[in-house]
Image (tube, rainbow, N blue to C red):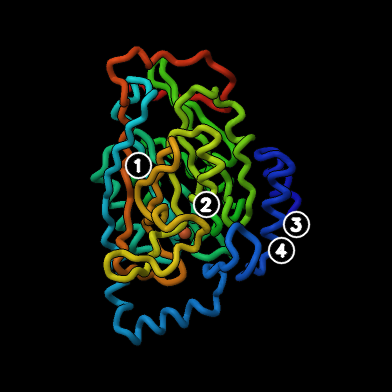
Amino acid sequence: MDDDILRLLEERLGAVHARQRLGIESEHDPQVFGQGLNFFHPENWYSAHAFIAYALKLSGLYWRGRRNTLDIRVRHNEVAIECLPKAFDGFRLLHLSDLHSDLNPPAMRAVAEAIDDVSADICVMTGDYRGQTFGPFEPALAHLAPLQAALAGLPVYAVFGNHDSVRMLPGMEAMGFNMLLNESVTLSRGDAHIALVGLDDAHYYRVDNLAAAAAGVPPDRVSILLSHTPEIYRQVAHAGFDLMLCGHTHGGQICLPGGIPLTLDSRCPRWMGRGSWRYRSMQGYTSAGAGTSIVPVRLNCPPEMTVHTLRSARLNTDDDVAPKNKKSARSTDWRS
Ligand SMILES: [Fe+2]
C-alpha cells in the first residue's frame, strides 16, 4: 500500500476508515459473488460486459440505447418536511448520481448543458464517478471537468459509490467538491439550520458509519442523508433522518417497456428503485442516474438529474428558530 496516500487519508478520514477502504480496494480482483450487501455484482462481471454489448448490437437496440444516454431529463421533486425552518422553504438541491463519467464522455457534455438551464441552491452528488470498479481513476476526474465548469459557483457536496476509489478524494476536493465521507455539514440561512450528512459506500465496501456521520447533528434538526445506495434505508429511517437521497440502481438502466427493471443490483424493495418513496416517517428519492454502467446504453429508463425543492409543511408556525446548537462538523452560510 502506498504510504503517502495512506498517511494523507488517515489524516483526512481517520485511521480505521482509511485502512478499511484502502485495504478492501487493494484486494480487488473485484468480486462478482459475495462481499457487499447483495450477493451478485454484475458491475464486477467484466467478462460479461462485452457479451451484453454484442447482444444489444445483434438485437438492433444498441445504437438507439446509446442515443438515449444523451437525452437527460430534468425531474422535479417537492419534499414537504413538517419541521423545516421557514427560511428553507423553497431551498433547492440539484441531485446528480451515477455519472460514470469516463464511460460516456458525450453524456457528460449533455449533463453539463442541462445544468446550465437549472437553478438550485446547492448540488449533491451520490456517487459512482468512475466507469469501472477498479483501475485508473484519473480519466473519470478529467471527464468531470465539464460538469465542474457548469456547476461553477454552486456549492457541491458529494459521497463515493461502489465504483469509486477513495484515492480519488484529494482530486475531487481539489476540484472544489465537498466530500462527505461519514461526515456532516450544517447549512444555514440566517439563524435557521439544517444538516446535510454523507456516507461512504455501503453497497460493496460497507464502510458507511452512520453514527460517526451524524455525531454532530442535534437530534431535533431537520437532516438530509446522502448515500450512494438506498439499501440502508432502514438504518437511516430509524436514525431519524427526514430525507434520504441516493442512486446506485440506475433505475434498472436497461428496462422493459413501462420502465420495468431487469435488475436493480440492490437489496431493497423494487418500489425504491427509482424516484420518490417513503419508509415510515422518512422520505426518500432514488435517482435513475445521469450516466451509465457496464454498457453505455439506456432503454426505457432515461438518464436524469433531479431538483429537489424543500417545502415547510408548517409555514404558519414559529418553527424557524434553530434548536440550541450542538457541535457540528462544518458550517456554511446560505444567506440569499
Ligand atoms: Fe452506478
Counting from the top left corner in percent of width and height, residue 117 is at 23, 45
Is the residue marked by circle 1 packed among few (<14), some (14-19), or many (20+) residues within 10 Å?
many
Query: Residue at (65%, 38%) from the top-left corner?
Result: 12
Front: mark 3 or 1? 1
Is the residue marked by circle 2 packed among few (<14), some (14-19), or many (20+) residues within 10 Å?
many
Residue contact between numbered discs 3 and 2, judged by CB atoms under 8 Å: no
Q: Is residue 304 above or below residue 153?
A: below
Q: CA distance from mark 2 to mark 1?
A: 22 Å
Badge 4 is on which residue? Answer: 27
Counting from the top left corner in percent of width and height, residue 86 is at 33, 20
Sequence-first disc among 2 and 4: 4
Badge 1 is on which residue? Answer: 94
Sequence-first disc among 3 and 4: 3
Q: CA distance from mark 2 to mark 4?
A: 24 Å
Question: Mark on residue 1?
Answer: 3
Return the residue found at the far front. 280
Is the residue marked by circle 4 packed among few (<14), some (14-19), or many (20+) residues within 10 Å?
few
Counting from the top left corner in percent of width and height, residue 96 is at 39, 49
